[in-house]
Structure formats: structure tokens, C-alpha cells
Amino acid sequence: MVRKNPNHIKSLGIDRFFDVLVYVLATVAFLIILLPLINVVVCSFSGGRAVQTGKVLLWPKDTTLDAYKMVFEYRDIWIGYRNTIYYTVVGTLLNIVFTTLMAYPLSRRQLRGRAFIMRILVFTMMFSGGLIPNYLLVKNLHLINTSWALWLPGLISVYNVIVMRTYFQTTIPDELLEAAQIDGCSNWAFLLRVVLPVSKAILAVMVLLYAVGHWNTYFNAMLYLSDKKKYPLQIFLRDILISTDIDMSSMTGSNVQEMLRRKEMQIIMKYALIVVSSVPILIAYPFVQKYLVKGVMIGSVKG
């Protein structure tokens, strides 16, 4: 008869308890994130009065598409969409190019002074010039009210440089570079023909991180852009979301009813705008999800 080790049984019990605890916490976190998202989508398909009175939770009330009709009839939304797509595509491309050009040399042992360069980069993560010096710099460079004001200040993310550099260090051995150089391969050719083709995971991660940042940004546009035709989508969304309440103290009769109806439509239009502005990123995410975890994990193994 084989006796079971009490310590082994106790260890299995602790492991099972830990697994159950992890699943419970993960489920709770998932619900905390999911339920508000569902509520936003449901409210966008519900009637304004039902939303305003708090009757809508996780199922539509007085289902209607009026909010989406208003959104797509709102001309500024299409201007914002066009500008945001332009800023996101060009900005992400610039970010990827310059982040790669910064991260790859720092990943090679042959680069002299790379430790000093890394210290300078890390220093910028802890200290910055501040809002006013940054604005004066952009102004002195004559970038106010131009697309470059949205791209240049955040051209390189130091965190992303560190992640990509670590990925190159752990994935591309120095011996591979030495073998390529023996065959007459230059550093540029090695980067373009060897490094980038085997770095699809980290490139996908960088594309997603930079693209989401460009898509959601509004603060730089609010600071540096004055021409409404150049506003990104998030500025128009922000203006609608923080629009002031209607003062009905001096209104009577039909005017009050009309203002109430407009207020109800304004409320559901806010929810519809949130959904419309989030859809492109939600569509793109599944295509890079498998690369996201792999790239971030490999890039965070070593500092």
C-alpha cells in the first residue's frame, strides 16, 4: 500500500486554492471592466428619457438608432475621423522608425557609451521640462497649428525603446551579426533583412501602443491646434462630453419641452460618440493580440 505524502497533499491543496483565487480575481476584474462598456453600448441604443432617468443598465430601453443617425449627420465627426486616421497612421510610422533606430544600436555590445546613453534616456523618464517650456519650444520651432506639433514631442517613447532594445538583445544574438558581417553584410542590411523580419512580435506591440496613443490623444491637439479643420476626433468628442448644461430658468411651455428633448438627445449622442470613436481600435486589437503578450513578455525579461 502506497502512503501519500501529507506535505504533497498540502501543497496540492494550496495550489488549487491559489488557482481558484486567481480565477475569481480575474473574473471580478473582467466584470469591472466589461459591465461599464456594455452599459455605454446599451445606452447608445436606448431612448434619451430612459437613459436620463437611470432606467438603462445592461439592456436597452425604448430601442432607437437616433443617436447614431445624429452622429453620422454631424459633419465635424467626419472631419475628426479623417484627421485622426491621418495623425495615427503617419505618427505611428514615424514612431516605429525612430524607436527602432534608437533601440537597435543600444542592443549591440559594439556601441561605445551605450550605458551612458541609456542613463540619459532613463533620466528623461523621471524629469521633464514641463508644460510651458514644451509649448515655448514648439512655438519657437514654428510648429503651432501643424501636424508636426502632434508628432515630434512624442516621437520616441523611452519605455518602448527599452522594451524593444531588450527584445533585440534576447532574440538577436551577437554571433548572428558577426556571421552576417563575415559574409559582407552591413549594419543597415542586417537590420532590414535579418532583424526586422524576425521581430514581427515586438513591432506589432509597438504599433498597437503607439497607435492607441495617437488615436486617444487630445491634450496636445488642444494646446497646439487652433484651426478647427485640423482637430482630431477626440477634440470633437471632448467638446460634446463637457458641453454645459442648458439653463431653463427663463423658459416656459413648448420651449422647455424642446430643450428637454434636445438634452435627452445630447445624452445618448455622447454614448454613441464613445462607441463610434472606439470601434476602429477594437477592430484592430484582435489582429495583434497574439503578438502583444509575446512581445511584451520577451521585452520585459531583462532590463
Image (tube, rainbow, N blue to C red):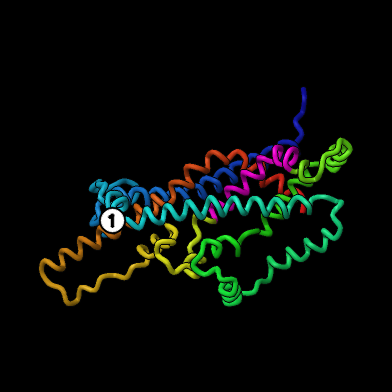
**Residue drawn at x 46%, y 54% as measured from the top left:** 84
Please give left or right for residue 108 compared with residue 239 in the image: right
Query: Dominant secondary structure of the magenta stretch?
Result: helix
Q: What kind of element bears circle 1?
A: helix
Point out residue 37 in the picture as x, y percentages from the top left corner.
42, 50
Alpha-carbon neighbours of circle 1 within 10 Å: few (<14), some, or many (≥20)?
A: many
Point out residue 110 in the picture as x, y percentages from the top left corner.
87, 51
Q: Quadrant of the N terminus?
A: top right
Point out residue 142 in the picture as x, y percentages from the top left corner.
56, 71
Give the amino acid at mark 1: Val
Between 196 and 63, the residue placed more toward the observer is 196
Q: Is residue 197 magenta?
A: yes
Q: Is residue 2 magenta?
A: no
Between 121 and 40, the residue placed more toward the observer is 121
Point out residue 278 in the picture as x, y percentages from the top left corner.
44, 50
Please give left or right for residue 282 compared with residue 76 in the image: right
Please give left or right for residue 303 compared with residue 45 in the image: right
Q: Quadrant of the C terminus?
A: bottom right
> What segment is highlighted magenta in the picture?
192-213
Q: Is residue 134 above or below residue 214?
A: below
**Residue drawn at x 75%, y 43% as measured from the top left:** 191
Q: Which residue is mark 1?
A: 51
